[in-house]
Image: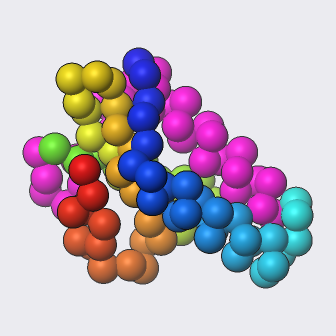
Amino acid sequence: MKLEFHPAVQHDFNAAVDYYETAGGPNLADRFEAEFRACLESIRVNHRSFAFYQGSQVFRRIRLQGFPFVIIYRETSAGIRVTLLKHERRHPLFGLHRH
């Protein structure tokens, strides 16, 4: 399945990597990136296996293992649109206005 990204996801990702690089060094930032990429691959391969997010019937989510982040995505006619990379402490509705 083809993945496409909301333009703000790159900012979300860069901010998280910068944080982990500053807080824990390059190895921690690399682990975060690897887990993010593994989650994207899981979405690409089996996107319907993950739970809907916050009772939505449109948005689904996958949690990153070992990091307090979720990837929010939705199915479109063209494939899968990754809408948001969000820290779990952010407001549950944060970023859902992105399409």
Residue 80 appears left or right of 25: left
Residue 3 appears left or right of 13: left
**Nearer the observer, 7 or 24:** 7
**Residue 20, x across and y down, in percent:** 74, 71
- Magenta residues (range): 28-57
Residue at point 43% right, 43% down?
Answer: 5
Q: Quadrant of residue 66?
A: bottom right
Task: Name the chief secondary structure element in magenta.
Answer: helix
Confirm whether residue 70 shows in the render: no
Q: Quadrant of residue 43?
A: top left
Confirm whether residue 12 shows in the render: yes
**Residue 29, x across and y down, in percent:** 78, 62
Residue at point 54% right, 40% down?
Answer: 39
Q: Is residue 50 above or below residue 68?
A: above
**Residue 35, x across and y down, in percent:** 65, 47
17 drawn magenta: no
**Residue 6, x across and y down, in percent:** 39, 49
Colouring scheme applied when the structure was drawn = rainbow
Residue at point 47% right, 71% down?
Answer: 87
42 drawn magenta: yes
Q: Quadrant of residue 97?
A: bottom left
Quarter of the image where the N terminus is located: top left
